[in-house]
Amino acid sequence: MTQKLKPVDVAVVGVGFMGAIMAKELAAQGLKVVGLERGKQRWTVPEFQAPEIHDELKYSIRKGMMQDVTREAMTFRNSPTQEALPIRQWEAFLPGTDLGGSGVHWNGQTFRFTEADFVWRTRMRERYGKDFVDPSLTIQDWGVTYDELEPHFDKFEYLLGTGGKAGNLNGKIQPGGNPFESRRSREYPNPPLKEQYGGVLFRKAATDMGYHPFVQPASNMSRPYTNPEGLQLNACNYCGFCERYACEHFAKATPQTVILPVLLKNPNFELRTEAQVLRVNLDPDKKTATGVTYVDATGREFVQPADLVIITTFAFNNARMMLLSGIGKPYDPKTGEGVIGRNYAYQTTSDVFVFFDENININPFMAAGGSGTLIDDFNDDNFDHGPHGFIGGSYIMSALTNGRPIEFHPTPPGTPEWGKEWKTAIRHHYNHTAHILIHGSSMPTRTNSLDLDPTYKDAWGLPLLRMTFEFPHNDMKMSQFCVDRAVEIGKRMGAKTVAGYPRKAPFTTQKYQTTHNSGGVIMGSDPSTSAVNRYLQSWDAHNVFVVGTSAYPHEPGYNPTGTLGALAYWSVDAIKKQYLKHPAPMVSA
Amino acid sequence: MKLNLSMIGALSVAAAGLLLTRPFAEGSPKPDVQRGAGIVASGNGYGVVACATCHALSSVADGSGASPKLAGIPAYYLAKQLRDYASGVRADAIMSAIARTMKPEDIADVSQYYSGVRGTTTPPPAAEPDLLALGTRLATVGDEKKMIQACESCHGREGRGEAPAIPPLGGQYASYIALQMKMWQEGDRKNDASQQMTNIAKRLSARDIQAIGLYFERIPQRDLPKKSRQP
């Protein structure tokens, strides 16, 4: 028996970072907002307190904070000719669950995409000619520009308390910052984090080689901070338990520390946890949504009518929600037509390990999630790709996020993978190894996509999402090029051995790479090639907004969260200023 | 005060064994525990009075709470406090004057001595149950509304400390803990670069502070595991 509830103005599906931002802004407008979160409530106190929160087995190995695969998994295959099978344990990427979503267990790395990223297709054709880009790459422009987003980037960084050094203040290049970044209107709210020793060695080497090193912008507090919402955060103490964990110190920007307490104080907002949304309901003409259907923890089904539905359920889950609700034409890789599931992209990460003599102590355990010293010289469109035959790039960063005992045991090539020699090698190298992360872009292709699995279903009987993904040749070429540059830097750092691992096909879900999944509900200016318009409003049902990295037509070489926060503020700003006065498509198709 | 030499001798042997694994002493001479014991018992002859006058040899002290128990506190932490007293970032009318007369080796030796002393349990003061419950909650769980993490998130289970930089609190005098929290609160003590303690203390009420002290004082002193006693 489905119970129909009293209508509300807004239903927000998923209460993570973006859900909390959208809900907070709309509730402040006087709208009745309900937040539906499939997981449970959790707070810094008591759930995140040490020593329990530093349980490496529970959180890193058994993925204690991630989407429950026994209830809601996804299937995977490398190519459309294979049969997809369910992912039974998260490894390559780690989608979070419970209040705050993946915003609780993230590392805090907070970048902005560049001007070029938002006009990627145009930029590539203008700079390199129309035949340069591999025709199998389905790159597109985003329908929004960096300049339009700049105030919203700024707002998000001040919400988070991001620490960094500006490299480009209103067009003026600043010493110590990233000279390749696009113009920012003011400094970061906080100074950069302290550098790790590996970072210091990297900085020296990179400077000597003529590159432009800087400290990674991060939302682990570099000093005590009070954000514009009035919430106070403490300084990070570099404990090395950030990613995959929650912060016990109120020192990492998470929904719980930077926005949720303010949202929950607003009587216009109601949070319902353990509310599994099954679908967005549509009018018979399928032009507008009428609300959502969800199931609570006891299995009772409810219909929550709402005038506005905002979907913020994590990148690929957004695509699944659209498919389950029948909003937008599903993408078909055979014809290249359709929009939901289109342009799924990932991140092409690669690694270089720099092994020193025992007289150099790296102290990997002294780390914030966002610790890192990097160069942006080979990222994005910051260098001439003409001679290299690929597009995109990577930042190259000396970074160690932890020295945790189960996970961190670097050994040089040729070391046995078990036994006495392995153990000796770990003892030998544990404190004398630096890591260089090559964090690269991911270009969309015609076959890399998302759809509903024909076979496997979740705990509520609904089809799982099926992911089809393989690294494009373009991206593997890019990875090799950037790994070669990183190896050169590693050698210059004074290493005994430098081992580079460029990314190679096949992509496997069994090795951790990053949780930066993107695409599937992409933004754009043409309804035949994008699912949402420049305001993240569905082309098909104008009162449905889809906020997530699902909107990215491709994944640039930067961590995605900063740009996502900017898009959320940009979208909700348009809802407030335009949509609420005149609820209709904000861009005519 | 009479010196119990046999006790100090035994301790110095135990401490000497631990010296082999001291990563923070690289490049500096190894601390001399026996010399440290001498300073504790009778002063250094050029400005330092016998530490034991206030802190006792076993560091049970006079029980007033004005002088903290020092037993089992990591040498790294004690030495840093002495240097901070001397520089003034942790200002104290008595300790700053004493610390300024101490040579680096005096600091190292005295710190090494107290870090190796086994603590003694003193009868805890009476506490009303509500206050104790509040202290237990703040120390072991924290307070979401005030945005205060559990004290034990850093100071360890039962306040055992996290060597070398985070001091143990278990068994410490409640009145001493309360005084320090008040000093953090009012900015008289500012030797925590992260400002963690300043910010936490500012969010605590006088009753919270009293309660936290009572919780920690009631924890019996125990033979701390060697690795947490020594850096």
Image (cartoon, grey):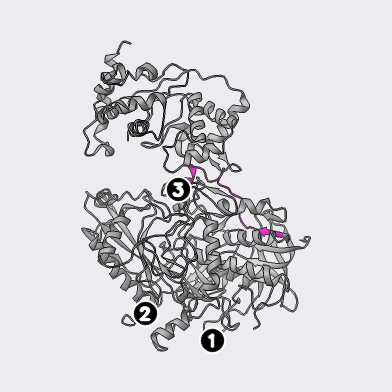
Query: Which residue is rendered at x = 75% and y = 74% of the image?
Result: A283
User: Can you tell which of label 3 and label 1 is closer to the viewer?
Assistant: 3
Asked whether the viewer can see residue B71, the reply is no
Residue A512 or A271: which is nearer the viewer? A271
Residue A18 or A24: which is nearer the viewer? A24
Find disc 2 in the rendering and name its residue: A390
Query: Which residue is rendered at x = 52% and y = 31% of the image?
Result: B182
Asked whether the viewer can see residue A148, the reply is yes
Judged left or right of residue A222, residue B131 is right
Q: Quadrant of residue A543?
A: bottom right
Q: What range of the chain is rendered magenta?
A: A33-55
Judged left or right of residue A87, residue B133 is right
Disc nearer the start of the sequence (2/3): 3
Residue A335, labelled with which disc? 1
What chain is tagged by disc 2? Answer: A
Instruction: Specify the quadrant that holds the N terminus of chain B.
Output: top left
Q: Identify which amino acid the numbered label 1 is placed on.
A: Thr
Q: Main secondary structure of the magenta part?
A: loop
Q: Quadrant of residue B12?
A: top left
Disc nearer the start of the sequence (3/1): 3
Q: Quadrant of residue B229?
A: top left
Mark 1 Cα-neighbour bin, 10 Å: few <14, some 14–19, many ≥20 = few
A447 magenta-colored: no
Disc nearer the start of the sequence (2/1): 1
Find disc 3 in the rendering and name its residue: A236
Residue A447, labelled with which disc? none
Helix, strand or loop under label 3 = loop
Mark 2 Cα-neighbour bin, 10 Å: few <14, some 14–19, many ≥20 = some
How far apart marks 2 and 3 lie (CA) works out to 39 Å
How far apart marks 2 and 1 lie (CA) works out to 25 Å
